[in-house]
Image: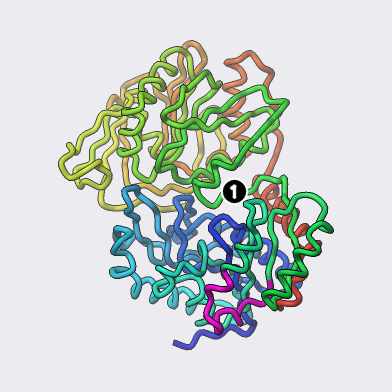
Amino acid sequence: MNIEFKNTPIMVLGTSSGAGKSLIATAICRYLKRKGEKPIPFKGQNMSNNAWVDKQGREMAYSQALQAWSAGLEPSAEMNPVLLKPKGDCTSEVIHLGKSVGSSKAITYYEDWFDSGWEAIKKGLKILLKSDKEGRLVLEGAGSPVEVNLQHKDLTNLKLAKFLRANCILVADIERGGVFAQIIGTIALMKPEEKRLIKGIIINRFRGDKALFETGKTWIEKETGIPILGILPWLNEIFPPEDSLDLLERKQTNQRAELEIGIIKLPRISNFSDLDPFFRESSIQMRWIEPSEDLGKPDVLIIPGSKQTIKDLESLNQTGMSNQIINYSKNGGTVFGICGGLQMLGKSLEDPNKKESINDLSNFSHKGMNLLPIKTTFGEVKRNSQREEIVSWPKNKIVKGFEMHYGKSDLIDKKNSDIISLFKNSSLGWVIEKEDKSFVGGTYLHGIFENDQWRRQWINKIRQNKGLNELNIKEENNSDYRESLLDLLTDSFAKNINLEKVL
């Protein structure tokens, strides 16, 4: 298959996972767009439970969606043709070009899925080439490109770079320490033809005076024969994390906070980007809560999405967190669940096809926390779609988001006068307002908190309960905020990195 774009692709490789590949690729997309080029983001294979649904109802990693927005494009699954969504127990759901095609154990993945994965990658590239041959691919690698035990079956690093004859940039994270060993060790493990692909090195997350690193820069260039394109400073702005490991490093200290939102850090947490809008609310402090920790007394508790709802619910049961949440709610605490979190709040979860069960011997029926009168049944077909709905609580408003789940939830007692349907025309969520002004509810709509006016109305319900003045429901636009962050990122990149050496 002949796949050749007019402009030489750029590939961002890292000395390790978390080196900053994703955000640097995002910055390059916006940088090229400013220059009048047509950047096209692409990551052959990604492993992440932080996903997005494109307009065709296909799944892709959220990081590639962010890169598409940075490039001024509509996200599409072709930009991330292979997505692995970890389910726990060394097993992942395998998604090709946005559609679920099965599950795989880690130990047999390359044997079972390498060939079909490579075909999905080439098909994605071919579709992107057909849509815009004038574009320039901005490729993101995964993890380290020189894992010697995996290199012969690596779908998304040097195999792809050689296939597309890409100009590669190696990113090293100086914050982690050992930056010289990171760079020298990575390059030493490359074959000569692979090393020739590396056209530049970026030192990422540097703190302090860059002049102090000048001798280090000179030494690296002399030892490798590869130019340092620049040193990117530490950025204080908050960007969406790539995976759940990044959440451990995501700190928020808000001196002016009036409310605390507690978030249960589920073992198989997914779509945690749902919570990003709260990180820019000056009146809110976020606190991640491990299932084994004491719940404390947050002003509101959020149970986020889960890749394996029943298994995560069992984890909450075993640690006693489920009982903590039930007691918290019954004693005036406000609880809100998103997707899997909503399902956990119901009375029961039925899994007749063993989609989410703990093991083959487990029952197909599982008890929920019984805080909402709903029953969830997990079917064979996943519901993936972008949605625009009229939300009826706290006030009528049109909101946008997307759903991505197997389970279908239904009211058990439709005559229950206490329960309110969150949406006018859809079973996408419910809420119960209690006499003490607290509430318990949830929704299947991912991205609902990105709807700024609705988010403020939701926050105000909690503020009322605490006796605080309401926040202004001013007209805001989450996409405008995202654009401003992307511009800040790109401004820093353009100021500190000489990409012309690669172009």
Residue of label 1: 240
Instruction: Give 493 or 60, whichever is nearer the viewer.
Output: 493
- Residue appearing at x 52%, y 80% in the figure: 191
Residue 260 vs 408, above or below: the answer is above
Instruction: Give 235 or 181, whichever is nearer the viewer.
Output: 181
Instruction: Give 459 or 428, whichever is nearer the viewer.
Output: 459
- Residue appearing at x 46%, y 67% in the figure: 147
- Residue appearing at x 35%, y 72% in the figure: 114
Q: Is residue 344 left or right of residue 70?
A: left
Q: Position of residue 215 (x, y in %)?
A: 79, 64
Q: Is residue 193 magenta?
A: yes
Amino acid marked by disc 1: Pro
Q: Position of residue 207 (x, y in %)?
A: 75, 50
Residue 280 vs 284, above or below: the answer is below
Identify the magenta region. Answer: 186-200
Q: Position of residue 412 (x, y in %)?
A: 27, 28
- Residue appearing at x 53%, y 57% in the figure: 17
Q: Tell me the quarter of the picture where residue 468 sits.
A: top right
Residue 460 vs 270, above or below: the answer is above
Quadrant of the image containing the N terminus: bottom left
Quadrant of the image containing the C terminus: bottom right
Q: Is residue 104 left or right of residue 204?
A: left
Instruction: Give 452 or 272, whichever is nearer the viewer.
Output: 272
Q: Position of residue 163 (x, y in %)?
A: 50, 82
Asked whether the viewer can see residue 3, the reply is: yes
Asked whether the viewer can see residue 103, the reply is: no
Residue 204 vs 154, above or below: the answer is above
